[in-house]
Amino acid sequence: MFYHTPSHISNTRENCGLSESRVWKIINEFGTHAYRLTPLQALLGGDAERRYAWRNFAVNQSEFQPTLLSDIIGTDEAIFSRNKICNTHYWALENPKCSATFEIKYAFD
């Protein structure tokens, strides 16, 4: 398995003295495929309290606005990241269904 970002290809190319096309040819010769990682955000100290506050708000508000929860757009396709871009791949023979935790700032830019 090979974890890849654009800089990893450059580093591999420089360290091995190979051209970028040769590095890609080697990756393809092994029959590996690129799988996207799902970036995860670690829970912080005050997250539990904020989650309970949101739950209490939603339960109380749903008495006055019964469609509140159905009005909220939810999808498992949306991934919000603080670093704006996550262009990493995990190369393997089959889908490893893996995730990665990245060190990021606490404040949004």
Image (tube, rainbow, N blue to C red):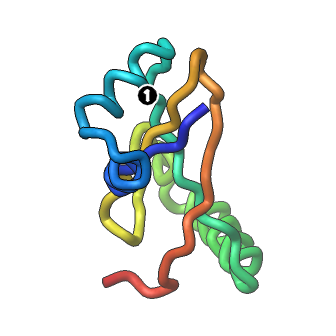
Above or below: residue 12 compared with residue 106? above
Estimate the x, y position of residue 89 in percent, counting from the top left. Answer: 44, 39
Determine the residue located farthest toward the front in the rendered image: 17
Is residue 107 shown left or right of residue 95?
left
Query: Local crowd at mark 1 within 10 Å, few (<14), some, or many (≥20)?
Result: some
Q: Helix or strand or loop: what does disc 1 sit on? A: strand
- 7 or 54: which is nearer to us? 7
Residue 16: tell me if it is visible: yes
Estimate the x, y position of residue 15 in percent, counting from the top left. Answer: 42, 54
Q: Residue at x 66, y 78 (%)?
A: 50
Give the residue pinned by disc 1.
34
Q: Residue at x 25, y 39 (%)?
A: 19
The number of discs equals 1
Above or below: residue 98 compared with residue 28? below
Estimate the x, y position of residue 80 in percent, counting from the top left. Answer: 40, 59
Q: Residue at x 53, y 53 (%)?
A: 39
Above or below: residue 33 compared with residue 88? above
Which corner quadrant holds the C terminus?
Answer: bottom left
Above or below: residue 9 compared with residue 46? above
Residue 71: tell me if it is visible: no
- 64 or 18: which is nearer to us? 18
Q: Residue at x 51, y 84 (%)?
A: 106
Is residue 26 shown left or right of residue 47?
left
Estimate the x, y position of residue 57 in percent, counting from the top left. Answer: 62, 71
Which corner quadrant holds the N terminus?
Answer: top right
Is residue 62 shown left or right of residue 49?
left
Q: Check disc 1 and give the amino acid type.
A: Ala
